[in-house]
Image (spheres, rainbow, N blue to C red):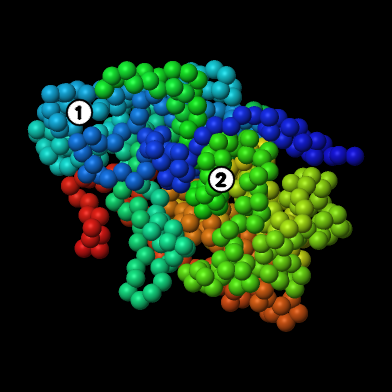
Amino acid sequence: MQSPITRFFGSILAVLVVSTGLLASSHREAPLIADDPLADNTDVYAFRSPDNPNTITILASYIPMQLPQGGPNYYTFGENIRYEIHVDNDAMVPGDEITYRFTFQRVNEDPTTFFNVRLGQENLKATYTLERSLDGGMTFETIVTDGPVPPYNIGPRSIEGPVGLDSSYEDLMMDAVVTASTGESVWAGPSDDPFFVDLGGIFDLGDSPRQGQDVESRDGLAQFNVHTIALQIPITTLLKQGAPATPTSILDPDYVIGVWASASRPAVRTLTAGDTSTYSGEWVQVSRLGMPLTNEAVIPIGMKDYWNALTPYQELGDTLLDKYFYNPELALYMDDDQFGGAVPAFSLLRVQRNSLGAFDFGNGQDGLFGLKGSAAVAGTALDDAVFGTLLLPGPGVPRSVDLWPAFHTGVPNVRPYQLATGKGGDPLAAGKPFVNNFLPNGGDMLRLNMAVPVTDRASDGFSSLGLVQAAVLGLTDPTYTGTADLEFIPNMDGFPNGRRLEDDVTRIELQAVSGVVLAAIGLWYDDYDPATSTSPVTQDLLDVLTYSTEVEANDRPFNSSFPYVASPWRGTEVNHVNLDD
């Protein structure tokens, strides 16, 4: 007989698989959206606000790789586009509970000049209307009208000069922060691209960090801008119906939300003259983003547009894409029995092929599937009676227990997903809790437990390694290893429990592909021998933890208050030719 949970999942999947698909995207990672940059999602962030912890900040960036000097027609949000931020807060209800919808209007205040800014007037001056739905998108309420968008940061004569706007850019940026009629703080405008990654090295067949003498890794997004939408929302607004006003613990399951962003356009555009077009038809989603790098570095080129055609809820019911998480391509380059030698930059990253002398997580192997149905997994998240076949669906899919849930469901505070601290060498035993962002009714989303306290950005304990650093402290620091009880460990609020601006998501995701999550719960690397090893902190584990792409921080410091993103690069100051000068 099926358990209620199993029947629940079955009913969700039955609903999802009959839904229709749309289009979606990120940092130019799929062919179709690359032709429509104004609607192209680049990144999504969701974190508990460090200076206002009763709120959650959600950021969604669009329009990738903007040259700051790209005049005379500088970048801004597009018209005839719905930019939306979606929030799922209830695992029992498939679909979004909350949606924020931005639509932008643009005017030329002085069409007689080719300058973008002159004598206090702006061309391509943008404003927005913000609507909010709390009933799954059935109805929307307007909560901001004529929201201001700061101008592009063109240069000192255009911004500070008396023949320009006669203001500082910092004032223009902060003056654009408004309060919605329903209490949210709102900002939309150009910003520095907060993502940092060596794009050139990564896509040069995984050359990150770059190999060879006198070859330096560099941030491929340094001195580029994006346009960012920012919301600071009271936690009480985001809580699911019936959740307690005060969390029962710092991992309260009722405080988990899923966040994703999208852009949609009318289905039909008709060109009626050289400078005139009309739009008609149903709104069609053309872009979406949740977890960083999913479509860029997990989904192969032949399936990217297909992945983009699914909403997160449709994705969970899909079976064609699961194999790329169960057996990720990147893992092949972290395995000496496969193609590990072909990517020397990943030499420190190795997947467990013989963990505890028994478990093989190499692509095509069985991982923990050999334990299915045994007494060893009874009562754990791997037990069919707990979550059905969600996490042990079959043989030959070894990463169904770590990578697949990280991208599709979040991780529950249920055995074995607790730190090895207190487990006594048994990875399936109860250990020290450190994460619970389980929300299993959608696919690719950022999942955040809003009950987890904030790690002070200025503290010595803050780390851009997010949950990886929290796991390291929970496993090795005497402050936390003395008990297996739940307690706050710095960076439990970091990626992939939400995503902070500072989080080094490229490094974290590559470490995750190499099995660091498996190691954290006690499935140690191959050089750990249960019979003779005195510590699980072996050389293989140290190698993974010390791996770096060598691009570990943004090129510009973030701000300490809302909207937190750094101001956009100025067109007169950037130097993409000699960044080291």
* Residue 44 at least partly seen: no
In the image, residue 242 above or below residue 251: above
Figure quadrant of residue 226: top left
Dot 2: few (<14), some (14–19), or many (≥20) neighbours within 10 Å?
Answer: some
Closest to the observer: 110 or 460?
110
Q: Where in the figure is residue 440, as x and y percent of width and height?
A: 67, 41
Nearer the camera: disc 2 or disc 1? 2
Residue that numbered label 1 is attached to: 122
- Residue type highlighted by circle 2: Met
Q: Where in the figure is residue 338, as x and y percent of width and height?
A: 61, 69
Q: Residue at x 25, y 36 (%)?
A: 74
Figure quadrant of residue 4: top right
Quarter of the picture containing the N terminus is: top right
Mark found first going from the N terminus, 2 or 1:
1
Under tag 1, what secondary structure?
strand
Residue that numbered label 2 is attached to: 303
- Residue type highlighted by circle 1: Glu
Quick one: which residue is furthest to the left in this view?
163
Closest to the observer: 317 or 2?
317
In the image, residue 101 above or below residue 508: above
In the image, residue 96 above or below residue 546: above
Left or right of 492, for residue 182 = left
Q: Where in the figure is residue 489, as x and y percent of width and height?
A: 57, 57
Under tag 2, what secondary structure?
helix
Closest to the observer: 248 or 252?
252
Q: How many numbered discs sit on the rendered protein?
A: 2
Dot 1: few (<14), some (14–19), or many (≥20) neighbours within 10 Å?
Answer: many
